[in-house]
Structure formats: structure tokens, C-alpha cells
Amino acid sequence: MQEILLKAKIHMATVTDKSINYMGSIGIDEELLELSNIKPYELVMVADVNNGQRFLTYVIPESKKSRKIVINGAAARLVEKGDRVIIMAFGIFSPDEYTGPKVLIMNDDNTVASIK
């Protein structure tokens, strides 16, 4: 049996900007994508810790080491700059291939505090 399981999570990242006049997506610092194994254009669920909103979108890379987390398009109406978010990517796995998620725990300035 195949199961949908958490593949990767960027926990408590800070939204650095938002742009309603964009076709959609979440921009994430390319270094964070590499560390978390989240791919450009991958589907992610985003949960805003400040207001409880959740939404699905896709990832676009932001400049490496920019520390940017940018919410674009309609989802920009669901967040505010400075909000803390949890970004989750899921995969479809068979039980014998799943080894657990890669989790980045973030500092307030979008540097990585730890990797689990």
C-alpha cells in the first residue's frame, strides 16, 4: 500500500514579503530548498501560525542566502509580513521506503536553528 506522508518541513519561517499582484506561489530561499529537499514547483501546504490560515501552493526559488519567504498571489491575502509559517511537503511512499521527514527548525531571521 502507498501512503501520503510528510516528506519535509520548514518549521516557523518568517514571511519576509507578500505580493498580491503575482500569479501565485511561495518563494523560498534556494538554500532552504536544498537543505529541506523541497523542489522548485513542488506542491506544499503552508500554515500561518499567527492566524491559523492554511493553503496549498507551489514553490518558486528565491535567491540563495536571501532568507526570503514570499507569499504571492491570492494567498498573500491570508498572511502578513512578519507572520510565522510552517511549510510542509508530502510524498507518496510505500512503508518500506519511508525514513521520516527532513525538518528545518528556523530562527526568527530565517536562518536554520537545527535540522532534524
Image (cartoon, rainbow, N blue to C red):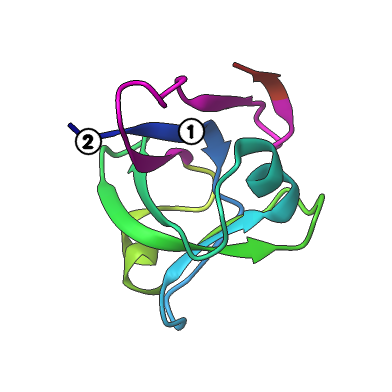
Q: Residue furthest right?
A: 65
- x and y percentages locating residue 83 in the rendered image: 47, 42
Question: In the shown orientation, is residue 46 left or right of residue 69?
Answer: left
- Residue name at image x 22 percent, y 36 percent: 2
Bounds of the magenta segment: 84-112
Does residue 3 lie above or below 115 as drawn? below
Q: Determine which residue is flagged by label 1.
A: 9
Q: CA distance from mark 1 to mark 2?
A: 20 Å
- x and y percentages locating residue 42 in the rendered image: 45, 58
Q: Relative to the observer, which residue lies in front, 35 or 23? A: 35
* Kind of element beneath mark 2: loop
**Rendered-image quadrant of the C terminus:** top right
Q: Earlier in the sequence, mark 1 or mark 2?
A: 2
Does residue 19 lie above or below 39 as drawn? below
Q: Relative to the observer, which residue lies in front, 57 or 93? A: 93
- Residue name at image x 44 percent, y 53 percent: 80
**Rendered-image quadrant of the N terminus:** top left
Question: In the shown orientation, is residue 112 left or right of residue 95?
Answer: right
* Kind of element beneath mark 1: strand
Q: Can you tell which quarter of the image residue 3 is in?
A: top left
Residue 76, disc: none
Q: Can you tell which quarter of the image residue 4 is in?
A: top left
Q: Can you tell which quarter of the image residue 17 is in?
A: bottom right
Q: Label 2 near label 1: C-beta < 8 Å?
A: no
Magenta span contains residue 7: no
Q: Determine which residue is flagged by label 2.
A: 2
Q: Which one is in front in this view, the residue at disc 1 or the one at disc 2? A: 2
- x and y percentages locating residue 38 in the rendered image: 55, 47
Q: Amino acid at mark 2?
A: Gln
> In this figure, what is the number of numbered marks?
2
- Residue name at image x 68 percent, y 43 percent: 32
Q: Amino acid at mark 1?
A: Lys
